[in-house]
Image (cartoon, grey):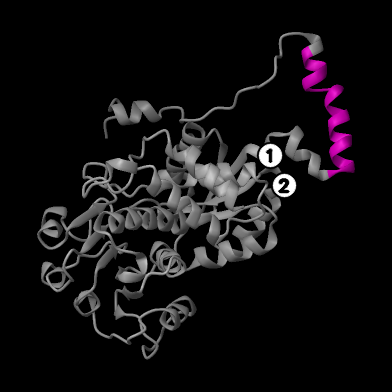
Amino acid sequence: MDMQDPIFLAHRGGKLRTAATVPLDSREDLSIAYTPGVARVCEAIADDAALARDYTWRSNLVAVVTDGTAVLGLGDIGPAASLPVMEGKAALFRQFAGVDAVPICLDTTDPDAIVAAVTAIAPSFGGINLEDIAAPRCFEVESRLKAALDIPVFHDDQHGTAVVVLAALRGALRLQGRETGDVTAAVVGAGAAGVAITEILRFAGVGDIIVCDSTGIIHPGRERLSPVKEELAKATNRFGRTGGVAEALDGTDVLIGVSGGLVPESALAGMADDAIVFALANPRPEVDPAVAAKHAAIVATGRSDFPNQINNVLAFPGIFRGALDADAKDITEDMKLAAAEAIADCVGDDLAADHIVPSALDPRVAPAVAAAVKAAA
């Protein structure tokens, strides 16, 4: 391992720091920023906890929390190895939305312990971004924290991905002159992202959704479904399809891959005309983009070296910026839909088959998303 490699050199010492926002150059400065002046602010907050929003950095501070069990495509690498990713996430918050963020890497995978730890530190933060926590644990952790806390809790692997997928789908359908209710979608993968994508597509009015896991199509007659998949079975696949990926894609308009598995070309061949393929596994998409282009009118991936990158950075900075600015207690489905619409609108007149979502570096996106989310809140 070459520690002089530019990647290692860029990460040496970490990617974050804190900085004072007030002068600390004189005794008077110290007496204002720290003791004795700070005691007056503490007493005011003790009398009225809501003042912490205005007189601390809490209103602009997000905790990026992980247990290190589902990091990128690396899997369960533990909390220490996850820290470079969480630092990067925090840097993106600051760069794109001016939100301060602190990485919190927990040395436990027990849901009770995770919930207890995050609940205990929550008074210091204005929002909680859950990151890279494996399914199905992530569903329980998010649900319990949302119920316990009065600040936004958002599992980005689920909802950030879902928002950008919906934004990309809106762009693709606009280009084709179709509405969400006109299409049938197959979601291949029923983990954190797959479940959230299915939920937001349902909320957005997609005609029908067929969800596949490693066993095949999820339907009410299938045995040994988890509670989450039982709910999916009730809410999707209204015509009762059974079988595997090929049966799910037969005549289907949209494929959304979030599984890491491979989708055979023969299954793609059965899709409807003008098909849309989002193959989002990283670094290896479920379908090679060149192969997908033989059968689909529009292709997107999660990679930056292909057109139409579906990247969560289009969503989470602006979503939290808007939620914090609105002093929101939660991030609702309406706020997520507003975020997706704002992302899609940023494409504007540049909409094309190879440009259905804006660039991850487009500086217009986070402010547009923040404004839409704040209005929806």
The answer to whether 255 appears left or right of 152 in the picture is left
Q: Which mark is first along the chain, 1 or 2? A: 1
Res 174 quadrant in image: bottom left
The reply to whether the magenta stretch includes residue 262 is no
The answer to whether 285 appears left or right of 68 in the picture is left
* Badge 1 amino acid: Arg
The reply to whether the magenta stretch includes residue 45 is yes
Q: Residues within 10 Å of mark 1 (few under 14, many from 20)?
A: some
Q: Residue 281: in sight, yes or no?
A: no
Specify the principal SS of the magenta part: helix
Which residue is the site of mark 2?
123
* Badge 2 amino acid: Pro
Which residue is the site of mark 1?
58
Q: Which residues are magenta?
A: 29-48
The answer to whether 105 appears left or right of 158 in the picture is right
Q: Residues within 10 Å of mark 2 (few under 14, many from 20)?
A: some
Measured as percent of width and height from the top left, residue 184 is found at 30, 72
Say which residue appears at 29% left-offset and 47% top-offset. Answer: 309
Measured as percent of width and height from the top left, residue 197 is found at 40, 64
Vertical arrangement, residue 99 with respect to residue 201, above or below? above
Cβ atoms under marks 2 and 1 closer than 8 Å: yes
* Nearer to us in this view, 340 or 100: 340
Measured as percent of width and height from the top left, residue 1 is found at 27, 35
Label 2 to label 1: alpha-carbon separation: 8 Å
**Number of numbered markers:** 2
